[in-house]
Amino acid sequence: MQLGRFQILLLMPLFQSSLSAEGPLNATVGIGVVDMPFFDGASDRRVMAMPIINLVYKNSLYLGPSRLGTMGAIGYSSDQRKRWVFMGELGYTIPRLERHANHYTGMGDRVENYWVGIGMQRNFGNSYLKISSNFGLKNDSGYFGTIAFGHRLISDRWIFEFTESVTLSDSRNVNYDFGISEAQSIKRLDLYNNHDNRLDAMDLGSFRGTGGIRDISASANVVYRISNNFNVITNFSGKYLTKKISESPLVRNRTSLSVSTGLLYRF
């Protein structure tokens, strides 16, 4: 799943599980800035401001950033302070448009998608192991799963979280994000031969991938509590695509780095 893990809502996962609930409905709003590639493997980057909204009801129902690896989601989680945590959600990811990057020229626009996600987390004090899977509902997008290990350091004003993860995808999910059909390949070759300067020779050819390990990721999150209501949260993350994924002409960079920061107000 490109961009979702993304990724664009990197600002919240640590925050929403590390602060205990004070009432039946807890709301967090804020504004963030993110610098990141348009999609996994892309060389083109975007710097953008975005609103942040996260609603949690009775420490279980939530609406806001995905907890299982897409973008926005509505879902249910058992109490994240317990030893075992179980989650389920309906997630959302944005469209991928040709104009997002030159090397998507000739691919056609890909519409938004919805994902059914399930996951469980085992907490070990301030460390945890999380396993999740997401199943795409549109565009033959297949499924992907993530195994993540994280550790938190918590003080009165600071929270630090470090996470390492491995993502696995089936062949449909690989080709949903990185595949180039014969028809798309022919169209791109025709554009290149007609001197479309958005495409290079390295962009030509078709690609059909197989399932397996998709990427390895690591991230660091930092939260500073200004007051009981205001918090600053910053994320640094890196992702490394496996060799067989990098064989797709849609991959310009195997390694991608993202930075995001935001100011949050918690009601």
Image (spheres, rainbow, N blue to C red):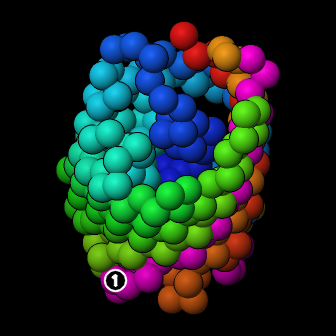
- Residue that appears at 34% across and 83% down: 211
Tell me if residue 228 comes above or below residue 144 in the rendering.
above
Q: Nearer the viewer, residue 238 or 120?
A: 120
Horizontal and vertical percent position of residue 254:
66, 76
Q: Is residue 43 left or right of residue 30?
A: right
Question: The residue under label 1 is which amino acid type?
Answer: Gly
Q: Which residue is identified by label 1?
A: 211
Q: For residue 33, say whether it is visible.
A: no
Can residue 119 be seen here? The reply is: yes
Q: Give the percent coordinates (x, y) of residue 25.
A: 37, 14
Q: Quick one: label 1, few (<14), some, or many (20+) residues within 10 Å?
A: some
* Residue located at (25% from left, 65% from top): 142
Chain part drawn in magenta:
199-227
Question: Is 204 one of the magenta-colored residues?
Answer: yes
User: How many numbered discs, if any?
Assistant: 1
Name the residue: 66% across, 14% down.
Answer: 229
* Residue 1 image point, x, y percent: 43, 59
Q: Quadrant of residue 119?
A: bottom left
- Horizontally, residue 49 falls left or right of residue 241, namely right
Identify the residue at horizontal 49%, vertical 74% (top origin): 166
Q: Position of residue 258 (x, y in %)?
A: 72, 53
Q: Which image quadrant: the C terminus? A: top right
Secondary structure found at label 1: loop
